[in-house]
Amino acid sequence: MNSCADLPTRLLTQLAPWRNAATWRIAFSGGLDSTVLLHLLASLATHHSLPPLGAIHVHHGLQAAADAWPGHCRSVCEALGVPLEIVSVQVLPGASVERAAREARYAAFAAALHSNEVLLTAQHRDDQAETLLFRVLRGAGVRGLAAMPRQRPLGQGHLLRPLLDVSRAELEAYATQQGLSWIEDPSNDDHRHARNYLRQRVFPVLTGRWPQAARVLARSAAHMSEARGLLDDLARIDLARAAIAGKFDWLGLPSLELEPLRVLSPARQRNALSFWLAPMTTLPDSDHWAGWDSLRDAQEDARPVWRLAGGELHRAGGRLWWLSDHWLRPVAGPVDWSLPSRSLILPDNGRVALSGQIPAGLLCVRYREGGEVMQLPGRGHRDLKRLLNENGVPAFVRGRLPLLYVGDQLRAVANLPGLDNGADGTWQLTWTPGNQDRGLS
């Protein structure tokens, strides 16, 4: 049986693959778990060659008692010789204060991490078991039941959880043995929070009947993590077949060919799409995938849309397109083009550039409003809507597509062959859309 005496060795083994990191940053709340982790690492650093240590404390400001915590954390870090960074965050109001605080905290961690740095958090085996049970009660699928991963990318670095095989009792024993002091968060006694209720009311009953409940549940989470890895591998295989280059790849928008997905079973479709969408949006639960069915099965001319958190999934030209809320916002125009500059930054819409001989006259970039007409060599006046249809331009692009006017005449439509240059072919208009359209990181 493990004991607190071998905690340093076990921790060092878990962190062995990360010994070449630039810095080990400890997420330090001042509570029992992170205090033990910080103390263990500081002690190991006196006998082993480790990356430089640093601690980061996130101050949420949700309760009066928390105002004293940064001072406590500073004292502990000074005693251990570990630099401390204190970051204050604003927790957005919402249905779940716990969730909002967590999102604010991890956003602060992500912003603080630099390249090749790792953030070490102190979640332990009991936390993992509680997470699994909590997600079971919410009806989570395999991805959710994998609970907390041991590691994942975060910001420019990585998040590591090296204590997931350690019990809360072992951490308490170590803290008592070392004479450590830590913060007791008064909100931990508030049973209105689901986590607290599970920890203080449910788990004592479970462990009273099944003493190894936390260990067994954590093992189940590990099995689910392995299953999730297999599902992710399958998703990569299915997505590779759908990642076919398209005519409008220059937009820089995430997109997939629909047909390779359509031939899969519904379960494989959901698995592939979940994997693809996960970096960009919060995924719906299993009861709210009807939007995907409608999008997939709609008629070609229906322009179906599936609204998700932070953006929309569109279908156009036989492809699926992810459009973040940034892309969906209207763009501001017109924008006058001051010569002799050959490029022009468009507010929230990237930039346009002119190559070749700049046309004479007053230049202005505008956006489509309807009713525009363009003079084409050998074709006379043509309605812009018809020209866009002929080029298969997706509907969601048309409001952002830069139109170059010389005086009052529409002279070019950016990036569309045959429409993006002058009648004599001596110049060309190129648009580079902004890169802020991927959604969540």
Image (tube, rainbow, N blue to C red):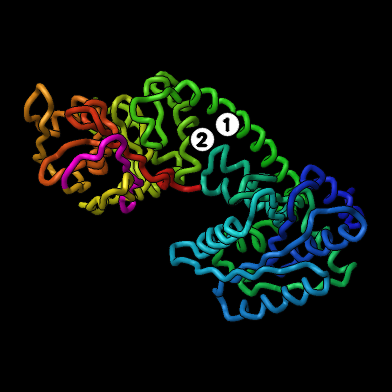
Total numbered circles: 2
Q: Quadrant of residue 375?
A: top left
Which of disc 1 and disc 2 is earlier in sequence? 1
Horizontal and vertical percent position of residue 149: 66, 44
Secondary structure that dominates the magenta span: loop
Q: Are marks 2 and 1 in contact (CB under 8 Å)?
A: yes
Q: Quadrant of residue 286?
A: top left
> Residue 223, relative to residue 89: is it above or below?
above
Quick one: SS at disc 1?
A: helix
Tag shown at residue 232: 1
> Residue 418, relative to residue 353: is it above or below?
above
Q: Going 74% across and 68% down the picture, which residue do you hit?
A: 83
Horizontal and vertical percent position of residue 17: 79, 42
**Would you call the spot at circle 1 few (<14 residues within 10 Å), some (14-19), or many (20 or more)?**
some
Q: Going 64% across and 70% down the picture, which residue do you hit?
A: 86
Horizontal and vertical percent position of residue 45: 86, 58
Between 392 and 138, the one lying in front of the other is 392
Range shown magenta = 346-361
Tag shown at residue 275: 2
Q: Is residue 208 left or right of residue 59?
A: right
- Spatial CA span between label 2 and label 1: 7 Å
Quick one: SS at disc 2?
A: helix
Task: Tell me which amino acid carries mark 1.
Answer: Asp
